[in-house]
Image (cartoon, rainbow, N blue to C red):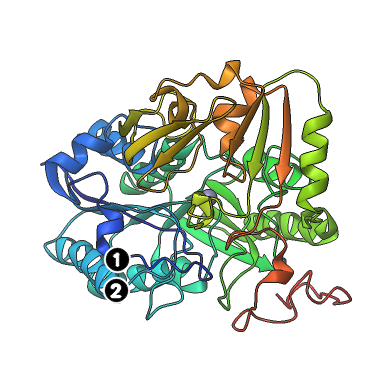
């Protein structure tokens, strides 16, 4: 008899400083929140839900998708939205299944829970103590003990911009299938270091994260451990568990995983200065852009970007299918969209927020950014997926907004202290984090 899987997505990166609340409507922008039409929307796309559907199909399993919710980063998830999403997943698991495959973000904060994913996993564990649970997470996860206790297997994105979302689910799914076949017995070890790493400088494609992610990738790809992931955390969140973390999935014995874990985290702590972003005045950045030859010159304002929870209101039907490397195959719906042409400048105005990670934000309304001298976008890092290949120069711009990278602008009251870089003179013993 075919195995039965429950596959679900519940994804949100919560910027607790964002004034935009996150009701259920924000999660259903693609239409259906569950069932066959949600499967149709996600299947074959470069997303973790797409990856898990592929895993279930390849396994020949019967599967249901009781929830396929994903929203742009914004403020706290409303209590009603959180309860609707988690209840749908928990109720489906209650009917009985052989495995649960969850596409989660790892940085969801609800009105009534600081750790949205930990609470969901806890609820599933309470009704299904022994069912294998495979989880794929975003690189910006704020890892908690509750997530580790609830899940059997955890993997995280290796890239930022996130161009390996489906692959992250496949990595988790591969270990799950071996677990179901009785080949392996996953055991997770995890840890963190109290570092608030700036999302402008913590991409795994550059140092200092490159070395850390390299250690994790090497250990997993060589089969030394089942899975290994490093998480940068998401700084625009005032929660107690904000930190840089790592999770190693071991087979039966955890000793070697613990050695790898400490090596990754100790290296992160040694290199903590590299995770700091040093802001400079916007006027200096604009002057630099003016002085550059050729084009396109991409000017990326990271103080108000959607993918970190910005409102994008400090400033045709806008629907297109992504062709670039990030979230390939998914449909972006920007709402009603207009182009204002001033003669020197064309301005794309859309009804809804959208992170510009794909050239489609311009090309779908007839603008070819490759032929422009300056391309101004509100983005932090994801724009690199679509725009880095066409940019002659990139100038990062420190605009105003609730996603600003100068973290001194935010008032944190719930984060655990000491925390680097707030407490620069802190010392760290191996087990203090
Ligand atoms: Zn992310």
Compared across the picture, whether 345 is left or right of 333 comes to right
Q: Quadrant of residue 220?
A: top right
Residue 240 position, x and y percent, is 58, 78
Q: Residues within 10 Å of mark 1 (few under 14, many from 20)?
A: some
Q: Give the residue number, with chain letter if any, for mark 2.
A: 123
Q: Which mark is residue 23?
A: 1
Compared across the picture, whether 180 is left or right of 278 comes to left
Q: Quadrant of residue 150?
A: bottom left
Q: Residue at x 58, y 74 (%)?
A: 241
Q: Residues within 10 Å of mark 2 (few under 14, many from 20)?
A: some
Pair 1/2: label in front: 1
Query: Depth check: 4 or 410 in front?
Result: 410
* Rendered-image quadrant of the N terminus: top left
Compared across the picture, whether 364 is left or right of 282 comes to left
Residue 334 position, x and y percent, is 35, 40
Q: Residue at x 81, y 26 (%)?
A: 292
Residue at far right of view: 425
Q: Element under label 2?
A: helix
Compared across the picture, whether 421 is left or right of 163 comes to right
Query: Depth check: 21 or 413 in front?
Result: 21
Query: Depth check: 339 or 297 in front?
Result: 339
Query: Depth check: 53 or 109 in front?
Result: 109
Is any part of residue 194 visible from this angle?
no
**Picture layout, residue 402 above or below residue 283:** below
Q: Element under label 1?
A: loop
């Amino acid at each position: 008899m075919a195995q039965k899987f429950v596959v679900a997505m519940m994804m949100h990166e919560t910027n607790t400083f964002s004034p935009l609340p996150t009701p259920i409507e924000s999660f259903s922008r693609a239409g259906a929140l569950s069932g066959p039409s949600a499967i149709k929307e996600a299947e074959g796309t470069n997303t973790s839900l797409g990856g898990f559907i592929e895993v279930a199909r390849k396994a020949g399993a019967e599967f249901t998708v009781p929830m396929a919710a994903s929203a742009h980063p914004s403020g706290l998830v409303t209590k009603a939205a959180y309860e609707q999403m988690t209840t749908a997943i928990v109720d489906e698991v209650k009917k009985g299944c052989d495995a649960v495959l969850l596409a989660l973000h790892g940085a969801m904060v609800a009105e009534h829970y600081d750790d949205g994913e930990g609470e969901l996993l806890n609820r599933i564990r309470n009704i299904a103590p022994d069912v294998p649970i495979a989880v794929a997470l975003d690189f910006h996860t704020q890892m908690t003990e509750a997530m580790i206790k609830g899940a059997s297997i955890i993997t995280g994105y290796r890239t930022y911009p996130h161009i390996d979302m489906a692959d992250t689910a496949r990595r988790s799914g591969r270990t799950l299938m071996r677990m179901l076949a009785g080949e392996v017995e996953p055991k997770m070890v995890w840890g963190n270091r109290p570092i608030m790493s700036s999302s402008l400088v913590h991409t795994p494609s550059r140092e200092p994260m490159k070395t850390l992610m390299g250690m994790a990738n090497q250990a997993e790809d060589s089969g030394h451990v089942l899975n290994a992931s490093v998480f940068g955390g998401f700084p625009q969140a005032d929660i107690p568990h904000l930190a840089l973390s790592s999770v190693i999935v071991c087979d039966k014995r955890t000793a070697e995983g613990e050695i790898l874990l400490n090596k990754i985290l100790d290296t992160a702590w040694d290199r903590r200065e590299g995770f700091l972003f040093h802001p400079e005045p916007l006027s200096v950045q604009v002057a630099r852009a003016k002085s550059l030859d050729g084009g396109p010159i991409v000017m990326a304002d990271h103080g108000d970007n959607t993918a970190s929870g910005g409102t994008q209101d400090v400033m045709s039907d806008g629907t297109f299918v992504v062709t670039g490397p990030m979230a390939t195959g998914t449909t972006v719906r920007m709402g009603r969209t207009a182009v204002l042409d001033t003669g020197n400048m064309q301005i794309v105005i859309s009804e809804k927020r959208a992170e510009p990670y794909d050239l489609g934000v311009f090309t779908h309304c007839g603008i070819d950014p490759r032929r422009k001298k300056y391309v101004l976008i509100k983005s932090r890092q994801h724009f690199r997926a679509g725009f880095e290949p066409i940019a002659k120069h990139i100038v990062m711009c420190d605009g105003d907004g609730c996603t600003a990278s100068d973290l001194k602008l935010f008032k944190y009251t719930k984060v655990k202290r000491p925390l680097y870089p707030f407490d620069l003179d802190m010392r760290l013993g191996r087990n203090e984090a």
